Amino acid sequence: MRVLVQQLPDAPLPRAHREALAAEILARADQLPARPRRGRLFPLVAIGLAVAAIALTIAFVPGRHTPTAQPIATPTPLAPPRPQITPIPQPARVTPESPAPVPIEPARAPAQLAKARVGGSGEFARDGQGERDLVTLTRGELTIDTVGTRPATVVTGDTAVGVRGGRIQVVAKRGVIAQVSVFAGSAEITVAGKRVVIEAGMTWDRNASREDSLAAFRTGWEALRAGHNADAIAAFELATDDVVAEDALYWSAIASERDHDAAGAVRRYRALLERFPSSPRAPQATAAIARLAP
């Protein structure tokens, strides 16, 4: 950066000194030797000296002086101000704490259900080692209750009756199961490889011959046409032979509907679908269940 020094004006001369100086300049002008005239050059020089003397006298008048021009300092360019950047506060990092270890509980064995309740006067042997009670009935009558207990199977000769969550009565005669009645739930009866499912309120009778089944069906049909719905249902349940069992189940369900027994009708329609899934009446039974079931 260049520093400029201001020039100070000369100190003013006293008045007497200035007048004496002017007189001396004029006297010296008169003492100059004469030179050959060259036109009008000399008079002009004399006049110029006189004017200079007068101007010098005026310049040194007390209280007046010609100010010296002050140099203008070139301003140094200023650097542009830097923008102030306010830092954005960052959220504090939260380090997740490691979860407390969850204690591993030892695996619990499934609760063991109680054995099925067995009552009655029949002779039987019982094996309750597996997940299902196995009851071998020799003769007589037994009541098997599996509501809230593990399931049970009753076996006599070539017939087996399974029950789960229900209550049934089984009658054995001459080494075979002659009759099964269902009071709650359902029962699955297997005879010589054939399976039959009966619902609560139904009875299966082994001794009923085909002729007996046909006769029972005719009785039920006549009662249904006469409007005796309860009698029709009782007769249809005796028609257990495969020849008429499909029709007997269907019309017994119809009789239940006409008797305003929706629950009984649903049970019989479902029995029809389980025993005869390919029945031509299966669509009607399915639609009736959807209509009647709560």
Image (spheres, helix red, strand yellow):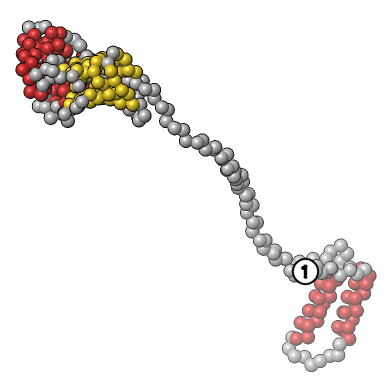
Q: Residue furthest bottom?
A: 36
| 155 or 180, nearer to the observer | 155
- Residue 218 location (% of width, % of height): 5, 13
Identify the secondary structure beneath mark 1: loop
| 109 or 26, nearer to the observer | 109
Q: Amino acid at mark 1?
A: Val
Q: Residue at x 91, y 79 (%)?
A: 24
| 45 or 97, nearer to the observer | 97
Q: Residue at x 54, y 37 (%)?
A: 103
**Residue picked out by circle 1:** 3
In this rendering, is residue 208 above or below 127? above
Residue 184's image quarter? top left
Left/right of residue 103 with respect to residue 32 in the rendered view: left
Where the C terminus falls, by quadrant?
top left
| 166 or 29, nearer to the observer | 166
Q: Residue at x 77, y 69 (%)?
A: 3
Residue 166's image quarter? top left
Residue 8's image quarter? bottom right
Where the N terminus falls, by quadrant?
bottom right
